[in-house]
Image (cartoon, grey):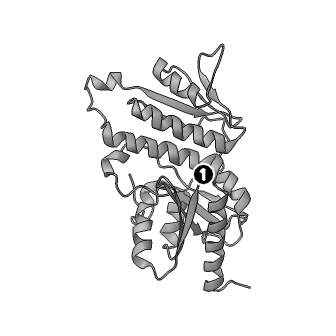
């Protein structure tokens, strides 16, 4: 039997409420029903995704959603997955781009694309903390940095002096970086990164996803305060938790905000 609209709405709202309570730190959930047309239209414009969620919205306009808000203002959106009937993944979740930042701040920042979730909010919370939240917080740190430290024009002498700390996912879920300055190294070690005796780099274990997410977020903020940009990237050996990549972003719905 197919669920009616009321059952679908209750299911989404209930799932989001439980999920919010299971995520690291403190989150609250706000459900937006179909009647909230203006809120949903603005929300669709701010969803920070050019992959799975963008493709879903291109085929199925946003008719209801739940917004999860963290104490620091960071936001995630949870929506029903409508693109297939035969799937174990019932929901989609993605980051929301802050409305207060100018479009220029997003230039050169890779979208922290959303992921699919099952209807188990407890397992889903682990997946969000271990994957989406880390990428989302890193992207937030980058765009916030860009608002106060605009990228220098090509040929500007400042470009050669700007430091970037590149954190790369490892096959075991850890994050690693090499070639950082003494100032950056101090921030990393203060947030749990362990120096390698032979590599000269720094490594952050992925054994506890909540601890790892917090360390990445705190490191990003502290590096930003020093004028150092933190960049998160995937290695070719790290397994992905998201669905296979969709069609090129340029072919997707124009209503989804691009950066």
Q: Residue at x 32, y 43 (%)?
A: 147
Q: Is residue 155 left or right of residue 229?
A: left
Q: Is residue 227 left or right of residue 118?
A: left
Q: Residue at x 65, y 61 (%)?
A: 21
Q: Which residue matches tag 1? A: 25
Residue 137 placed where, x, y %?
Answer: 51, 46
Please say if 172 is above or below 8: above
Residue 146 placed where, x, y %?
Answer: 35, 40
Residue 240 placed where, x, y %?
Answer: 65, 46
Q: Residue at x 32, y 26 (%)?
A: 159
Q: Residue at x 60, y 79 (%)?
A: 9
Q: Nearer the viewer, residue 150 or 156?
A: 150
Q: Is residue 164 left or right of residue 171?
A: left
Q: Nearer the viewer, residue 215 or 238?
A: 215
**Quarter of the image that includes the N terminus:** bottom right
Please say if 212 is above or below 65: above
Q: Nearer the viewer, residue 81 or 204?
A: 204
Q: Nearer the viewer, residue 55 or 40?
A: 40
Counting the numbered discs, the total is: 1
Residue 57 placed where, x, y %?
Answer: 50, 67
Label 1 environment density (alpha carbons within 10 Å; few <14, some 14–19, many ≥20): few
């Amino acid at each position: 039997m197919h669920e009616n609209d009321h059952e679908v709405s209750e299911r989404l709202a209930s799932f989001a409420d439980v999920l919010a309570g299971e995520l690291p730190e403190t989150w609250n959930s706000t459900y937006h029903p179909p009647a909230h047309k203006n809120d949903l239209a603005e929300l669709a414009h701010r969803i920070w995704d050019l992959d799975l969620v963008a493709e879903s919205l291109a085929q199925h306009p946003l008719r209801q959603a739940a917004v999860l808000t963290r104490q620091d203002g960071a936001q995630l959106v949870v929506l029903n997955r409508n693109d297939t009937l035969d799937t174990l993944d019932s929901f989609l979740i993605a980051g929301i781009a802050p409305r207060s930042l100018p479009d220029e701040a997003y230039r050169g920042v890779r979208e922290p694309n959303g992921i699919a979730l099952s209807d188990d909010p407890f397992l889903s919370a682990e997946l969000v903390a271990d994957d989406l939240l880390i990428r989302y917080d890193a992207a937030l740190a980058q765009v916030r940095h860009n608002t106060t430290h605009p990228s220098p024009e090509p040929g500007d002498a400042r470009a050669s002096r700007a430091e970037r700390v590149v954190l790369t996912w490892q096959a075991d879920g850890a994050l690693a970086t090499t070639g950082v300055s003494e100032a950056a190294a101090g921030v990393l070690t203060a947030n749990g990164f362990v120096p390698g005796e032979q590599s000269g780099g720094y490594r952050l274990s992925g054994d506890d996803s909540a601890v790892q997410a917090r360390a990445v977020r705190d490191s990003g903020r502290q590096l930003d305060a020093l004028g150092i940009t933190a960049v998160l990237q995937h290695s070719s050996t790290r397994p992905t938790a998201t669905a296979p990549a969709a069609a090129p972003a340029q072919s997707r719905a124009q209503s989804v905000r691009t950066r």
